[in-house]
Image: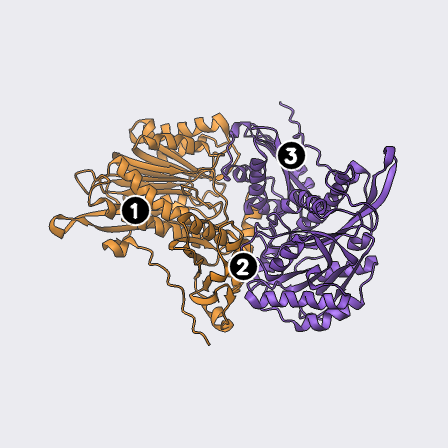
Chain colours: A orange, B purple
Amino acid sequence: MTSYQPLDIPAYGHAESAYGFAPCDGGVCAAAGIRAAGFSAGFRRNPNRRDLALVVADETCVCAGTFTKNRFCAAPVQVSRERAAAGRARAVVLNSGNANAATGDEGLEVARTSARLVAEAVGCSEEEVLVASTGVIGVPLGLDNFRTGVPACVAQLDRSAAAAHHAARAVMTTDTHSKQAAVVGQLPGRDGTPGTTIHVGGFCKGSGMIQPNMATMLAVLSTDASLTAAAAHAALLSSVKRTFNKVTVDSDTSTNDTCVLLATGRATVDPIDEASPAFPVVAAAVRAVCESLARQIAADGEGSTKLVTVDVLGAATDEDADVVARSIANSPLVKTAVFGHDANWGRVAMAAGKCGVAFDQRRVDIDLLGVPVCRGGLTVPMDEEDMLRRFEAPEVSIAIDLGMGTCHTRIWTCDLTHDYVTINGDYRT
Amino acid sequence: MTSYQPLDIPAYGHAESAYGFAPCDGGVCAAAGIRAAGFSAGFRRNPNRRDLALVVADETCVCAGTFTKNRFCAAPVQVSRERAAAGRARAVVLNSGNANAATGDEGLEVARTSARLVAEAVGCSEEEVLVASTGVIGVPLGLDNFRTGVPACVAQLDRSAAAAHHAARAVMTTDTHSKQAAVVGQLPGRDGTPGTTIHVGGFCKGSGMIQPNMATMLAVLSTDASLTAAAAHAALLSSVKRTFNKVTVDSDTSTNDTCVLLATGRATVDPIDEASPAFPVVAAAVRAVCESLARQIAADGEGSTKLVTVDVLGAATDEDADVVARSIANSPLVKTAVFGHDANWGRVAMAAGKCGVAFDQRRVDIDLLGVPVCRGGLTVPMDEEDMLRRFEAPEVSIAIDLGMGTCHTRIWTCDLTHDYVTINGDYRT
C-alpha cells in the first residue's frame, strides 16, 4: 500500500524567531511613553463592565491607521481615517456598547465632540485624538457618558500592565476574554552588535462580524521605536495584510474596523524610515504582535471551540490562494464539520471547488490535522479513531495543495457552533 | 413626525397569474408520457428509506440540463453533462446516500454502468440515460445496489402521483420533506382562443450545500409540450437563472448540482421553437415550477425555521443587485438575527456595505417584514411588539433600496439555527 506523507507546508515566519524578539508583558503599555485606562462610563447596562478605553502618548507622536472598507462605515471611522492620514496623534478613545454606525451627521458630531473632550482633558488639539466605537449599529450614541467618563478615565491613565488590561477589557463586546500581545527585542546595532531595545504592544477586540477587509476590528498598537509616518504606515499595512486581514470568523465585515499604531519614539533617537536596516526588524515585530492578536480573535470567534488554520499551497497566484483559503474558512459546512470532529474532507474539496478558481481535481491533495486524507482527488484510507483523538486539540489544521503553482497563504478561522447561533440570535435582547 | 411608507417592491411575475396556469397534482408525472418510481435499494443504512429514483419517458424525448460549476464536480455530473448536450434522453436515474464525488475514474465507471443497467431494463441506448447522485463526498459508490435495485425499480414505474412522490422521496438527504410542483395550462390557440393543454411538473431535493451556481441541486422536470432541444435548453436556463440560482442556504455550492428537463411532446404536435408565440408561455410555466421548487428548498434549508425573501431595489446594475442580495442572504449575522426574531437592520446594512458594491449610505432605505426601519441610512422608530408579532409568520421579507438606479433582484434563503449546526456537525456519524 502507498505510504502517504503530509503536505510540506511552508514555514510561516514568526518575528520572534526570525529576529530574536521575545514576548513580554504590558500589552499596549509595553512601549515607553504610553499610558492607558479602561473605565465603566455607562455605555453598557452592566455597571461592572468597563466600556470606555483611552490610550494616550506622553507627547504627540507618529501614528498610522487602517480602517474598514464597508460602505456603511461608522462615524468614528470617518473621523479617524481623516486624522490618521495626517500621521500624528496624541490619543485614541474607544467605547464599546454602541458602534455609532448608521447615525448620520449627528453621529459624526458625537464622534468629534468625544475627541474634543479627550483633547481638553489631556491637553492637545482635537485633531490629535482618534476615536473608535464598537457595539450595536443604528442606535444614536449619546454624549453624556463621554462628558462624565472621559475626565474620570483620564484621571486613571497609567503605564502599568493592569492599566493596559483595563483598556483591553473596555473594548470587549461578545469577546470572552481580553486580547493583548507585546514583544521586546533589539534593533540591529553597528557591526552586528545588539542595538537599541524596542517594544511593540497592543490590544484588540473582535469575535463576530469578523472578516476584516484591508483593516481590522478594533486594535490599538504602540511601539517606542521612532518611525517616520510613512514607515509606520508601511509597517502597519504589511502586517495587517498578513494577519488581521487573514482572519475570518463569519465572513461579515464590520462597519467599525479600526487599527491604529502609535509610535512614541522613546526608545530610539533618529526616526527609522523604510530604507533603514532597522525597518524590517520593526515591521516584523509589529507583525508578530498583529499575528498573536489575530490568532486570539480567531480562537475567540463567537461560540468557537477550535482555532482553525487553513493553508492553501500550490496555487497559481496569491489571489487564487486567498480566494480558496477564504472559501474553505467561511464554509458553514467545513466549520460545522470541525465542530462535529468530523474528518469530512469532501467538504473542504467542495469549498475549494465552488469559488471559481481553476484547478484539476485529479491533482488536489488534502491533509486534515496533519494526516493525508486525499491524494490526487481520491480518498486516502484513514484511522478514524486517530482522527478523533487529534480533534481533541485546541487547534485544527486544514491544508490543501491545488497542484497548480507555487503560491500559498494561511488563514485563521474557527468552527461554527450552537453558541454562535445563540449569541447572535439574541444579541440586542 | 414623518410618515414612512414601505418600499415599493416590483411585482415578481408568477406564471400562474401571467398566463392562467394553475397548480396541479402529479409532480414529475403530471406531464403525459412520464413514469416514475422510488425504491429502497440499500444505498442508505435505513432499509425503510427509498434511495433510488427513476424517471422514464415512454419514448426517447427532448432533454436539456444544467449542472454545477464546482471544480470538484461529481462523476455523474461529468457523465450527464455530456449526454444532456446531445439534447435527447429516455431516462434519469438518481440515488441518494452517496454523491459519487471525488471518486476518480472508478466513479465515472460506476456512473456509466448504472446508466447501462437502466438502459438494459427499459430498452434504450446507454447514452439516453442521465445519472445523478447526492450524499456523502469521497466515498466509493458500489454497483451492487444498482444491480439489484434497478430492475426492481423499473418494475415499479408508474404514471401515478404516488409514483412521482416515491421518486421525490428517494432523492432526499437532510431534506425534511419531499419537494414537488406541477402546473397545468393552455398554450395560445388561433385567434386568441385557448389552445392545447400542457403540463409542467417536477421534483427536487436540496437542503444544505445550497448556493447553486448556474445550476441547481438535484431536480428533474418534465413537460408534455413538444419543444426543440434548443427551446428546451433556453426555457430551462432562463428559469433556473431566476429561481434555483437565486436560492442560497449556506453559500456552499454542491459538487453534484443537476437539473434536467424532459419534454415528451405528448400534448402538442409541432415542436415549439424559441420564435414560437407558445415559447414564452411554456418558459413561464417551467419557471413557475422552478420557483415553487426553489422556494421549497429555501424554506426547508437545513435547520431552518423561516423562509427569507431578500429584495434588492435601486441598484445600478443587475450584477450589483445580485451581489448585495447574496451578501445579505448569506450573512450569518443576518440569518441568526432572523432566527432570534431580532429586527436588527444594522446587520442588513453591514452585509450590504461589505460586498464591494458602491453606494452612498445616506440614500439607503431598508424595510423588514414590510415595515420601514431605515430611511436615508438612519434609523426609523419602530414598534418592537409589532415586529415580534410579524416574526411569527413562516416567511420573513427583507428589502433594501440602494438609491443608485433601477435594477432589482429577489433571492430566497432561510435563517441560521441551532439545528443547522446539529445536522452538519453530525452528518457522517
Choose the circle earlier in sequence order: 1 or 2: 1
Give x and y (percent) for residue B320. Answer: 56, 36
Q: Secondary structure at mark 3?
A: loop
Q: Chain of mark 1?
A: A
Give yes or no for contact between labels 2 and 3 (Cβ–Cβ under 8 Å): no
B426 and A321: which is toward the camera = A321
Nearest to the eye among marks 2 and 3: give it.
2
* Direction from residue A254 to residue B65 in the image, left or right: right
Nearest to the eye among marks 3 and 1: give it.
1
Q: Is residue A354 visible?
A: yes
The amino acid at mark 3 is Asp
Give x and y (percent) for residue A202. Answer: 33, 46
Q: Chain of mark 3?
A: B
Q: CA distance from mark 3 to mark 1?
A: 48 Å
The amino acid at mark 1 is Val
Badge 2 crowding class, 10 Å Cα cut-off, few under 14, some 14 to 19, many 20 or more, is: many
A331 and B147: which is toward the camera = B147
Residue A278, placed above or below residue A375 = above
Q: Which residue is mark 3?
A: B383
The amino acid at mark 2 is Arg
Which residue is drawn at the image coordinates 54% and 61% (left, top)?
A: A346
Which numbered marker is on residue A286? 1
Which residue is drawn at the image coordinates 54% and 57% (left, top)?
A: B72
Residue A195, placed above or below residue A78 = below
Q: Secondary structure at mark 2?
A: helix
Q: CA distance from mark 1 to mark 2?
A: 35 Å
Give x and y (percent) for residue B156. Answer: 80, 66
Quadrant containing the C terminus of chain A is: top right
Task: Name the outermost residue toward the bottom.
Answer: A1
Q: Which residue is mark 2?
A: A347
